[in-house]
Image (tube, rainbow, N blue to C red):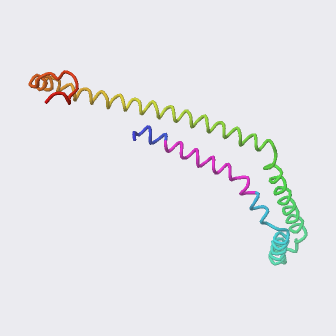
Amino acid sequence: MSKAGQRDMLTFMAMRWNQQKLDQLAPSLTHRCQKLTDSQLDEWVSDVKDWAEAATTRTSNVDPLVSRIEVLVASMKGRSQRLYKDTNGSKARAKIHSFSLTTKRIDIIVAIRRLKEEKKILVREMDHHWKSLSKYDDTLKELSGLFPPVIGPLSSVS
């Protein structure tokens, strides 16, 4: 395979891999967010509160930290809900469809380039083969003159 063909193949493979990543991104993120249960969030919040209380006993500024943590937890819950909502929306499907069409166009362009490259290689090989046969043209004419001409089917000559 030529260097251009190898480059096209690597490009094609990278584009396909990226397409698969994109196709699996929304379900993967949704699955991750769904794994995170409210009990796990509450446990995480209590762990952070315990850590914050231990760290801030010297400064006794626990209330601002607790309120900040609660805001962050609420923000995380909102983001996970928006993420789930966005993956089911028509806009997300339209983006994926648009990307899919773009990928198909690029695949066609890469295939056309590959065909052009293969055509060039084939023409070069045919030219080389023709030149090598042309070298033996005189020899073949001389050899053909040594044999009598065959007329009709070969099976009738005995």
Q: In this view, does 86 lie above or below 135?
A: below
- In the rendered structure, which segment of residues is drawn in magenta? 9-29
Image spot of residue 10 (x, y percent) = 50, 45
Q: Quadrant of residue 35?
A: bottom right
The quadrant of the image that shows the C terminus is top left
Q: Quadrant of residue 42?
A: bottom right
Task: Identify the main secondary structure in magenta.
Answer: helix
Q: In this view, does 94 lie above or below 116?
A: below
Q: Residue at x 52, y 35 (%)?
A: 110
Image spot of residue 12 (x, y percent) = 54, 42
Q: Is 72 a magenta residue?
A: no
Q: Which residue lies furthest to the left in this view?
A: 146
Q: Which residue is drawn at 33% across and 29% down?
A: 124
Image spot of residue 71 (x, y percent) = 88, 61
The quadrant of the image that shows the N terminus is top left
Q: Residue at x 19, y 21 (%)?
A: 151
Image spot of residue 62 (x, y percent) = 88, 72
Q: Is 12 a magenta residue?
A: yes
Left or right: 105 in relation to 128: right
Q: Quadrant of residue 52?
A: bottom right
Asked whether 77 or 50 is in front, the reply is 77
